[in-house]
Image (cartoon, rainbow, N blue to C red):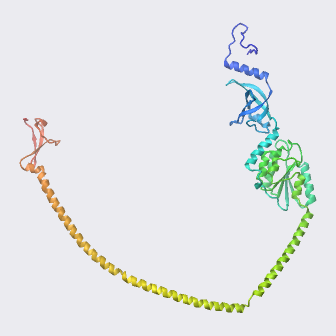
């Protein structure tokens, strides 16, 4: 497509107007931008930062006067040591392109670094804040070191100065200490996972009394493996007390913050674990002297208490005689109490007997029987009166019914004529026609008739 930068609307060689579709124009603008701005460095503040399910970073770079949309795909994020966030000022290496469906130009970011703080320092502060909010650095989770360590586990490089310093200090101070090394890389890609695996292996497969995790000094980048989240969480989950010995005294990593004890150097960590044998011997001798002294004091005090009790102790025969006297006295009091108790119960039984005689069931049964006979007599009388009243009422009703019965009318010579077979009462000759069948009810019996003639 022939696309002129200066006059894209100019006529072609034949003098005709050049007309572009929207897609052609957008595609041409995209090609121009990508050709003229293949890579640019852009500085600005992150705004409207969001991460959808795809994992890509979508945001807006802005300054005081303008803004531009930007996207950093997931594949480019592996080089980031920090997480972008709202309001952070960054420097981006990007390609300028156009998103054709909306006709918007945007930046495809390949690299990003924060302005002000370095990328590692920012990543350190972000992870430190998040883990501190979860409580991983709280003192309540710190485990004490054992008084005397017999088995020491070390997670470090097998060729570094750290393991040599630890072995040298341990052999000089406490030669009986058993040292077990889990060799790992202490810097570079994948080293953090190896360190975490070493901590987990000691906890799961070969438990020791104390675990030292560390390395010698180096740059902040060299020590970065001990700032990785996987290492920090492995130390936090360790059931074995962990001493962190990373770098020099001025270097403070996240592993130092989460560990149960922080040592400024690997040598200092070994000194915390391996106590001097001579110091232990002196301590044991001092404890033995204190034990002998305290035992002698306890024996003297016990002897004095025994002698005092011997002086207060009475002869068993005297104590036996006193016991016999107290037993006789108690027996007499018990007999008197039993007699009083028996008398009280006897009087109570007599009162209950008198009450029972007054409330004898035989008297109540006689009264109830008399009441029952009287009630039966009253019931018979009431039933007779009810039957007599009902008979009289029935007779009066029969007389009234006989008086009002149509049969009485029929007895005087009247009849009731009905249509056949419907049975409707015929009150007028207009209800019948010649040859209709009729039913006639008489006082005695009924007739079935046929109409031969109708007269009004």
In the image, residue 311 above or below residue 107: below
Which quadrant does the C terminus fall into?
top left
Q: Residue at x 13, y 54 (%)?
A: 400
- How far across and down, in percent of the image, does residue 414 sit? 7, 46
Q: Residue at x 91, y 64 (%)?
A: 279
Asked if residue 200 lies left or right of residue 174, the reply is left
In the image, residue 421 above or below residue 19: below
The quadrant holding residue 174 is: bottom right
- How far across and down, in percent of the image, does residue 305 sit? 79, 82
Which quadrant does the N terminus fall into?
top right
In the image, residue 17 above or below residue 342: above
- How far across and down, in percent of the image, does residue 409 sit? 9, 49
Q: Residue furthest top?
A: 15
In the image, residue 100 above or below residue 18: below
Asked if residue 342 lies left or right of residue 410, the reply is right
Q: Residue at x 14, y 56 (%)?
A: 398
Asked if residue 187 lies left or right of residue 64, the reply is right
Q: Residue furthest front?
A: 64
Which is more toward the observer, 174 or 295? 295
Which is more toward the observer, 389 or 174? 389
């Amino acid at each position: 497509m022939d696309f002129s930068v200066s006059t894209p609307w100019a006529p072609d060689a034949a003098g005709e107007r050049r007309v572009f579709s929207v897609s052609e124009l957008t595609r041409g603008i995209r090609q121009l931008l990508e050709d003229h701005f293949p890579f640019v460095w852009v500085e600005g503040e992150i705004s409207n930062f969001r991460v959808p399910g795809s994992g890509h970073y979508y945001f807006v770079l802005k300054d005081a006067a303008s803004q531009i949309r930007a996207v950093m795909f997931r594949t480019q994020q592996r080089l980031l040591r920090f997480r972008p966030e709202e309001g952070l000022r960054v420097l981006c290496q990007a390609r300028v392109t156009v998103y054709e469906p909306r006709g918007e130009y945007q930046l495809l970011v390949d690299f990003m670094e924060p302005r002000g703080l370095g990328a590692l320092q920012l990543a350190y502060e972000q992870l430190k804040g998040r883990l501190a909010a979860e409580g991983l650095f709280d003192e309540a989770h710190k485990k004490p070191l054992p008084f005397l360590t017999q088995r020491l586990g070390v997670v470090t490089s097998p060729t570094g100065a750290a393991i040599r310093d630890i072995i040298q200090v341990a052999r000089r101070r406490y030669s009986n200490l058993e040292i077990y090394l889990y060799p790992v890389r202490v810097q570079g890609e994948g080293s953090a996972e190896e360190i975490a695996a070493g901590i987990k292996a000691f906890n799961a497969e070969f438990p020791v009394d104390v675990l030292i995790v560390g390395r010698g000094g180096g740059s902040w980048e060299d020590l970065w493996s001990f700032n990785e989240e996987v290492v920090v969480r492995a130390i936090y989950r360790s059931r074995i007390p962990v001493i962190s010995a990373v770098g020099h005294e001025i270097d403070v990593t996240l592993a130092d913050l989460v560990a149960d004890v922080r040592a400024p150097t690997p040598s200092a960590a070994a000194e915390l674990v391996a106590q001097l044998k001579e110091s232990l011997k002196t301590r044991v001798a001092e404890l033995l002297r204190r034990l002998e002294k305290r035992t002698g004091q306890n024996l003297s005090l016990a002897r004095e208490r025994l002698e005092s009790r011997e002086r207060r102790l009475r002869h068993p025969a005297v104590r036996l005689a006193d016991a016999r006297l107290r037993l006789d006295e108690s027996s007499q009091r018990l007999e008197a109490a039993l007699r009083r108790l028996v008398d009280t119960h006897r009087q109570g039984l007599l009162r209950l007997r008198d009450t029972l005689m007054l409330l004898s069931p035989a008297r109540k049964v006689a009264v109830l029987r008399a009441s029952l006979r009287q009630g039966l007599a009253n019931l018979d009388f009431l039933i007779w009166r009810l039957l007599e009243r009902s008979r009289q009422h029935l007779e009066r009703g029969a007389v009234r019914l006989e008086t009002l019965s149509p049969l009485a009318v029929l007895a005087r010579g009247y009849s009731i004529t009905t249509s056949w077979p419907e049975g409707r009462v015929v009150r007028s000759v207009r209800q019948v026609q010649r040859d209709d069948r009729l039913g006639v009810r008489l006082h005695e019996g009924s007739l079935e008739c046929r109409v031969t003639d109708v007269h009004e």
